[in-house]
Image: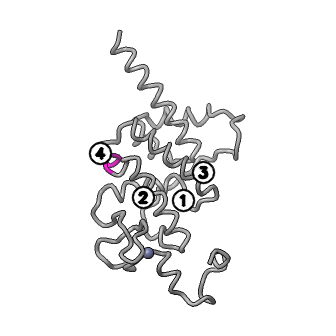
Amino acid sequence: MRITDCRYDRDRLRLAVAYRLIAHEARTHTIRHCTGLSGDRIRKLYRNYPADVPGPRVRRRRGKSPRQMSYFRRSVEHELQAATLATLLACCGLLRRIHRLPAPRIEDVARFCDAYEAFLCVCPSTLISFEHAWYLGLTLARRDEFLLARCPDCRAAWIRDTLDLLPCNCASCRYAALPVPAKPEALRADC
Ligand SMILES: [Zn+2]
């Protein structure tokens, strides 16, 4: 009886997490990897996703998931938001766990959703989609090419390229060193 209850609870958790991932417009194969549900089951969940859920209408994203860390270097804002999100993931202990093979634990995916939703509260108009966040988390968890580190100049959280091919300090330090006319318009008011 206890085993049955436990399986039932895990199935419920799997479905609840799948709905959270659908709400974040994760792609089908990401949901499959994160929850272990079949593609067919996920497509049915999409069809049954309640139309009366508050907020923007959920779209089903197709195509490949992000695979380029260069996305997080597109601008100062991208870099700062990526470092903020990575710090949250590290605080939740997720950078040690989500790259488990063959798949992450459903409890860790649920916690990842918690962290990403907390991040959305901090950065409501973020440039980082759930898919980008998941890719960032997996990449940092592998600890090979990129690490969450401290900037050598200001000690702020910073995503460091371990091959040292990219800049050697954080976006804030590089931004502070720019002459005013070269600074992005959107950030100049925050000087
Ligand atoms: Zn710095």
Q: Residue 100 carries which label?
A: 4
Q: Which amino acid does label 4 sit on?
A: Arg
Write the residue at 61% across / 34% down. 47
Q: Give the range drawn in magenta.
A: 96-100
Give the colouring mode of the picture.
Answer: one colour
| Tag 2 residue | 136
Q: Answer yes or no: do the residues labelled 1 and 4 have beta carbons within 8 Å?
A: no
| Tag 1 residue | 128
Relative image position of residue 52 (x, y in whole percent): 72, 34
Image vertical order of residue 34 relative to residue 158, above or below: above
Tell us which disc is closer to us: 3 or 4: 3
Relative image position of residue 74 (x, y in whole percent): 52, 73
Q: How far apart are marks 2 and 4 (CA)?
A: 15 Å
Q: Which numbered disc flags the more N-terminal residue, 1 or 2?
A: 1
Q: Does the segment drawn in magenta span residue 117?
A: no
Looking at the rendering, the quadrant in which ligand 1 lies is: bottom left
Q: How far apart are marks 1 and 4 (CA)?
A: 23 Å
Q: In this view, does 61 lie to the left or right of 7?
A: right
Q: Is residue 134 left or right of residue 165?
A: right
User: Tag 1: Cα neighbours inside 10 Å, few (<14), some, or many (≥20)?
Assistant: many
| Tag 3 residue | 121
